[in-house]
Image: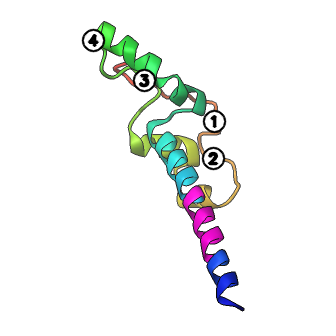
Amino acid sequence: MSSFELLMLLIVSGAFSFSLAIFGGMHFYLLLNNLTTIEYMEGSRRLRFARSTKDNDNHVFNIGWKENIISVLGETWKEWILPIPSSRYGFQIFMNKKG
């Protein structure tokens, strides 16, 4: 393998790794805050509304980072890794008491 091929491989794999890290980081942020992509994109409008109503905690479905992860992935690590039904089955929607 020539040095040019090695350099191109490094550049392409670096660009792919960077893109994958950005994509994964964004989804991890959405998971921790219990947001969908649409709710995230509408965030600036929600923040303007929060400033006008003096409401600091205005996302009603954000129940804390740990409970957000459990509500999406399941309660045990087996439910996180294996595609088995969750103990909550997705029929219960938990809401923030402050919202």
* Residue at position x 59%, y 40% in the image: 88
Mark 3 or mark 1, which is nearer to you?
A: 3
Mark nearer the viewer, 2 or 3: 3
Residue 82 placement, left or right of 95: right
- Rendered image: mark on residue 54: 4
Q: Quadrant of the C terminus?
A: top left
Q: Helix, strand or loop at disc 4?
A: loop
Mark 1 to mark 4: distance in Å? 32 Å
Q: Alpha-carbon distance for marks 3 and 1?
A: 19 Å
Residue underneath mark 1: 90
Dominant SS of magenta comes to: helix
Residue for badge 3: 59
**Which structural element holds mark 2?**
loop
Label 1 Cα neighbours within 10 Å, binned few <14 / some 14-19 / many ≥20 = few
Q: Nearer the viewer, residue 97 or 43?
A: 43
Q: Earlier in the sequence, mark 3 or mark 1?
A: 3
Describe the element under mark 3 as helix, strand or loop.
loop
From the image, state whether disc 2 or disc 4 is nearer to you: 4
Q: CA distance from mark 1 to mark 2?
A: 7 Å
Mark 2 / mark 4, whichever is N-terminal: 4
Element assignment for label 1: loop
Amino acid type, residue under disc 4 in the picture: Lys
Per the rendered image, the range of residues in magenta is 10-19
Mark 1 and 2 residues: CB-CB less than 8 Å, in contact?
yes
In x, y percent, where is residue 98?
34, 20
* Mark 2, residue position: 86
Q: Label 3 neighbourhood size at 10 Å, few (<14), some (14-19), many (20+)?
A: some
Tell me how far mark 2 sits from mark 4, CA to CA: 37 Å
The numbered mark, 4 or 3, whose residue comes first in the sequence reads 4
